Every structure is written in structure tokens, then in C-alpha cells.
Image (cartoon, rainbow, N blue to C red):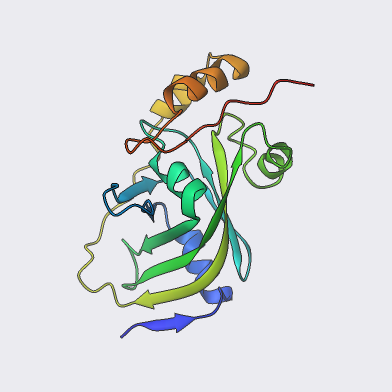
């Protein structure tokens, strides 16, 4: 039986803190665009308050999530218990993209994600609804650790070079929506 909440309480926040992976779902406003579902790991999710959360967008092959959030703000986060008691938790909300050149970015990285200065963005979420459900059909999995490919990929790249490559490679989504926005030149 599912339960709906207006915000995250201590029990739900503790559940989130124990999960090693979460999933982000978004969709463009246009009915012909592609729905996107992205898995995320590396301890990249933070609860900032009962109705506020954020996750660090560490990069990958596409920019769909960010493009959709920029277009319409809608975002759903899902956590599944792969160990312990069965549970699925969904967070529904409105997102705000904080790109690496946003004045808020450095402070957010330093406070919440100090391991990830090479993040493309931080997605800040205003939580509107929280829902959990049984998760009885979710199998058990054993956590063995994080993959190190992302860290090895960025390990020897200067930060400005890495950011320039993100602007070039992640300029638009597969539906042609704006992704990484080129930084404004200093005035």
C-alpha cells in the first residue's frame, strides 16, 4: 500500500541516505519528445530540507535530464531498496539547473558535493509530493562499490578544458532542447 507525504521526514531522509543508486525521470513538454530515465550513483543526492533536495549532475553521454528541467522544471526521483526491507520512494518536484558557471555553483559544490568539482550542474529540486510503496517485486542486490571510470576520465583534465568539452558535447538534447549553455563572456 502506498503512502503520500507533503515532505520528507527523518525516516524517509534516512532511507534515502542508505541508498547507493537513484533514478531521475523527466520528459519534454512536447508530446513527440523522448521521456528520459537516468540512473545516478556516487553519493550524489542530498536532502537539503523537508521540501528541498539536490543532486550533482556528474556527466555522461547525454544532457536530456538537464534539457527537460530547463524547459519545464518537472522532475521525479526514485529510490529502490535493494537490501533490507522492501520499499520504493518517489520524489516529485520542480527542478532548477545550477550550471557550473552559475554564481551559486561553487558554494553548493563546496558545501554539499566537495568530491565533485567537475560536475556539469547541480539540479536543485523543490519537492511538491513524496510517495512510497511496497517494492515487494524489487530483487536483492549486493553493493560492491562505485565504478571508477568517471574519476579516471576527469583525473588529468584541467577544469577549464573539461568544462569546454561539456559545452561542446552537451549543447543540446536528442530532441534539440538546450542543454549546457555556453558561459557568458566576462564583461
Q: Residue at x 32, y 35 (%)?
A: 174
Q: Seen in the image, is 187 located left or right of residue 114?
A: right
Q: Which image quarter holds the C terminus?
A: top right
Q: Residue at x 71, y 40 (%)?
A: 110
Residue nearest the observer in this picture, 178 or 91: 178
Q: Residue at x 62, y 33 (%)?
A: 100
**Image coords of residue 25 (percent x, y):** 37, 55
Which of the 4 quarters of the picture holds residue 88?
Answer: bottom left
**Image coords of residue 170 (percent x, y):** 44, 28
- Does residue 40 sit above or below 73 in this rendering? above
**Image coords of residue 130 (percent x, y):** 47, 74
Residue nearest the observer in this picture, 147 or 79: 79
Residue nearest the observer in this picture, 147 or 59: 59
Q: Which image quarter holds the N terminus?
A: bottom left
**Image coords of residue 65 (percent x, y):** 42, 45
Residue nearest the observer in this picture, 127 or 156: 127
Q: Seen in the image, is 99 located left or right of residue 176?
A: right
Amino acid at each position: 500500500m502506498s503512502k503520500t507525504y507533503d515532505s520528507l521526514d527523518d525516516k524517509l531522509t534516512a532511507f534515502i541516505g542508505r541508498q547507493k543508486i537513484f533514478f531521475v525521470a523527466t520528459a519534454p513538454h512536447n508530446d513527440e519528445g523522448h521521456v528520459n530515465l537516468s540512473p545516478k550513483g556516487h553519493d550524489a543526492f542530498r536532502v537539503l530540507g523537508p521540501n528541498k533536495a539536490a543532486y550533482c549532475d556528474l556527466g555522461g553521454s547525454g544532457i536530456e535530464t538537464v534539457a527537460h528541467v530547463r524547459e519545464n522544471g518537472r522532475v521525479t526521483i526514485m529510490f529502490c531498496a535493494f537490501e533490507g526491507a522492501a520499499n520504493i520512494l518517489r520524489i516529485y518536484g520542480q527542478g532548477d539547473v545550477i550550471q557550473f558557471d552559475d554564481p551559486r555553483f561553487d558554494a553548493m559544490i563546496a558545501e554539499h558535493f566537495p568530491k565533485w568539482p567537475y560536475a556539469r550542474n547541480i539540479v536543485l529540486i523543490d519537492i511538491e509530493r513524496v510517495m512510497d510503496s511496497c517494492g515487494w517485486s524489487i530483487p536483492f542486490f549486493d553493493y560492491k562499490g562505485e565504478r571508477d571510470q568517471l574519476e579516471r576520465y576527469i583525473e588529468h583534465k584541467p577544469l577549464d578544458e573539461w568544462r569546454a568539452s561539456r559545452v561542446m558535447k552537451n549543447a543540446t538534447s536528442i530532441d534539440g532542447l538546450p542543454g549546457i549553455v555556453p558561459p557568458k563572456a566576462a564583461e
